[in-house]
Amino acid sequence: MLLLSIPGFLAVFALLVAQRSDILHSKEQDALFFANQIATLQRVDITDTQLLLQNLAKNPALLNTQQQGCPQLLKHALLINQEFANFGLATPSGHVFCSLQPLKAPISIADRAYFLQAITTGTFSIGEYQQDRSVYTETLNFAQPVYVNNQIEMVIFAVRRLTNWSESLSHLPLPIGTRVMVADNYAQIVAEYPYSNKPLGRSVSDDWPTDLQLHSIQTIEDENGLHHVYFRLPLQAPQSELNIYFDFPFEDVLHEVNTQFLMVTLLFLLTILILSWFGRIQLNRSLLIPLNNFSNAIGALANGKAQKLDQKDMPIELGKLAVHFDKMATVRLDAETVAHNKHAELNTLIQALPDNYLRLSKNAHILDKHGDRVSDKKTIQEVFPNHINIRIKAALAMLPNQPSTYFEYVHKEHGQQRVFEIRIKRIEHNGEAILIMRDISQKKQQEEALNLAAMTYNNSSECMVITDAQGYILDTNPAFTKITGYEQYEVIGKTTSILSSGRHDASFYEQLWQSLITTGKWQGEIINKRKNGELYTEWLTIDTVYDEHEEPYRRVGIFADITDKKQKDEQLWRQSHFDELTDLPNRTSLKKQLNTLFGLPEHNFAVLLLDIDHFKDINDTLGHYFGDLLLQQIAKRLKKLTESSARLTRIGGDEFVLIYDRCADQQCATEFAENILETLKAPFILDSEACHIAASIGIALAPKDGENTEQLLKAADQAMYKAKQIGRNGFALFSAELREQAEQRILLLKDMRQALAQHQFEMHFQPIVSMQTQQITKAEALIRWQHPDKGMISPGAFIPLAEETQLIHQLGELAFEQAIEVLQQTQKLNKPIQLSINVSPIQFSAKHTTLLAWQQQLAKHQLTPDMLVLEITEGLMMQGEGRSQKRLTKLIQQGFAIALDDFGTGYSSLAYLKQMDTEFIKIDKRFVDGIEYNQDDLVLCETMILMAHQLGLKVIAEGIETETQHELLKQAGCDFGQGYFYSKPLPKTAFIDYLTTHRH
């Protein structure tokens, strides 16, 4: 029946395939028509842009511009046509003189292809993907020449943001899942829908098929098995090769067509199956069912079961055959039942044993088998290793003369060694053999474990002793003799009390035995005595072995001598809790002591933090050896002072902390501090050399000044620094004001770090003029911090903190970099000046500094070191620290000019002025302020000017604010002046403008 239906099925199938192809072609043509409609909209959009630019180019308002700015006409055009980001005008040479969007700097479009095309062809032109220089983003630009008297007077250009173009595509009535993309002459994507995270300007080949032909239809299956229809159509814009690409999802169409195709095919097949089913019913009734009954009965008989044949509706011939079959089946099954019962008895016996059995022929073929290891094996090669197979075959060959064989072998399974025993026994009546295989791995392991236990017992470095339940010794190992000194025969039969040291009382042993009685175990540290009377510490573990009645049978003690370990642990503990130099408790001990005091219900006490003043100078001048001697003697004095009244610790360096727990108020704390300072007044004798010291002490009271250890130590530290600030060799009490100052300092440091990251710091420049001509010849770079919330912050508030936290290096680099920018601009303006920048002593003394690299950085910008004046303070010149002096000398050798700032307020050493080859000194504003009404100040200024000139130095007077001050200093011979009389400090741009508008 099925064979007859095959030709009809093939004909229907061919018809359905043709119908499916026609539907798919129709759907593709619908998609192409839709794509042409969308492409037409884009062409109209470009044509509108062309008409807009052509109309603007002919407008009189534009023709009268004369390259002097943007006409109002363009601004109106931008307001009306919001799809554009900018309109502008450029000269025929490409210089942009009009841009509705503000420019950061003059720009030229002479290199842009769309501009060159507009100039060359004299007509409207369209650009390609670019990063526009006027709006600083991705655009496609359009250009139209503007003619005056048949000559190109200028070029008007329009800038269209590509993101706007992509957004406009999203407003088109596109089917769900459609992708649209516009590409320029170079196949770069300038607009797309939907908008992706990938950058515009990438190649079309990154996302689209590379072999799309114009006006062609191409169906492609993607990597996910989904079908898409692709089109590529030209926009046919003038002077442009813009193309628009379409990607229509075709999976739904295919699904619809395929579903229709499948439904018709299934319907046809169902019809054929129904017809076949009716024919099969008739065949089953007459022949197949009777034959199937016979087949089932034969199968049941093969499995040892009786199944009587149903002769109802069976033809006569088959009915007779069924009667004879039933008789034959009954006879056979009765015989098989008897044999099966005998086999079951034997099999039950075999299964009760744990061994594996094989019945083998003379040639080592497996005739029968039993056991987990052999149940699924067909040959002995699958059961045994090759060398064992050879041995088995040899044993079978010797069976006539040797009826039984026994041997063992080792085999590795799953990473473990297994041991097997093999027994081979001859079967007398047929020459076959029985092979019995037994796994004896556990037996071997037990034997090995016993041997290992004995070896461990005899060779262990730990002592082992076995006693009865009452503690009488039954056995010991050799290590017992080595540690205790007792031979085995000396302790057998005696109790373990033979080792007792007498260091533990009766309650200790009572608790030990109580633990053994209740839990059967005890573990702990115990001190015992050797045979020679020497005491030792051991770590002892006792376990109990119980008999079958759960009564204690034996006790096993294992112990190790930990005397050396205890001594080392004690030494380590002391090293971690005590200062090695002074043998005083260290910071760790201090914190534990304070934590203990804070844990008390009432904790009123004082903490005094003592720091030796100028201890570094002692180390630098006398050496660390004498410094250590001094610290030891200080510790002795303080220990003697405090041995009965306070706790003394050294927390590092030259810092000591005293805990005065008998003190609850400020009076007793200050009296104690005075006693400490008085104790330290007497000279210290260091190898016959007398040394006088002073100390600063910070006092904090608990719980008033701190509710925990960290808060209290921090408060004492802040008070100690306060004592140093007010003159050293004294003490200061912590106050809320100090805490507030510390918090303000932390906030200021946080703001300063944030200010550096957010570029809140900037340099202002104050002109320095010649006193004789008032011409600007120099300027000083001054750092300013414009805080977003607090406004302008004075350098005096943040420079010291910057020096302390090393942030001064970043501020110094900022000053240097902006100084380079200003010097470059003054060179371009042909108004060269010399710039001064302040350099902190920290920049000179730090281990890592960039000062010596400044010469190379100047050279990279075609600048020389003599264009910069480095202003330093007198303190730097007086420092004895070698690193700072070497760096200062190196900078002078490189050609940098040096100015001594705030001259007259410090040491004013003439010797250092001459030695360091200083070029300028700067008279501090404090002296200049009073010269109008204070003759002494004027004389002092005149003296400094005269002295500097005699040393060959130039003088700069700071803080000049009036004309009288200017005239007096000019008459005194001052070389240069700086101050608000000439100009206040100016931001960089304002300073450059100031230079261009004032005499130079």
Image: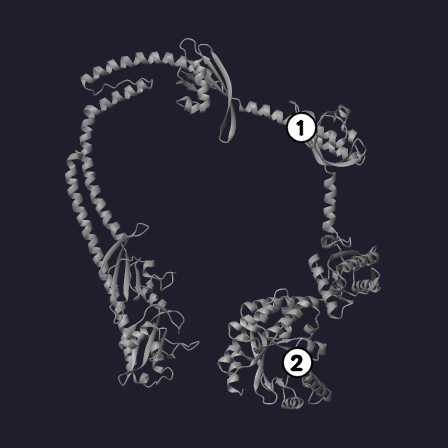
* Left or right of residue 150, residue 960 in this image: right
Q: Quadrant of residue 86?
A: bottom left
Where is residue 615 shown, x and y percent of the image? Answer: 75, 64
Task: Name the residue type under label 1.
Answer: Tyr
Where is residue 603 shown, x and y percent of the image? Answer: 75, 56
Q: Earlier in the sequence, mark 2 or mark 1?
A: 1
Q: 982 above or below 814?
A: below
Q: Quadrant of residue 713?
A: bottom right
The nearer-to-camera label among 2 and 1 is 2
Q: Which residue is mark 1?
A: 457
Residue sitting farthest toward the front: 893
Task: Name the residue type under label 2.
Answer: Ile
Residue sitting farthest toward the top: 429
- Please, what secondary structure does the residue beneath circle 1 have? helix
Q: Which residue is mark 2?
A: 921
* Left or right of residue 663, residue 752 in this image: left
* Left or right of residue 484, residue 406 in this image: left
- Please, what secondary structure does the residue beneath circle 2 have? strand
> 218 or 925, which is in the foreground?
925
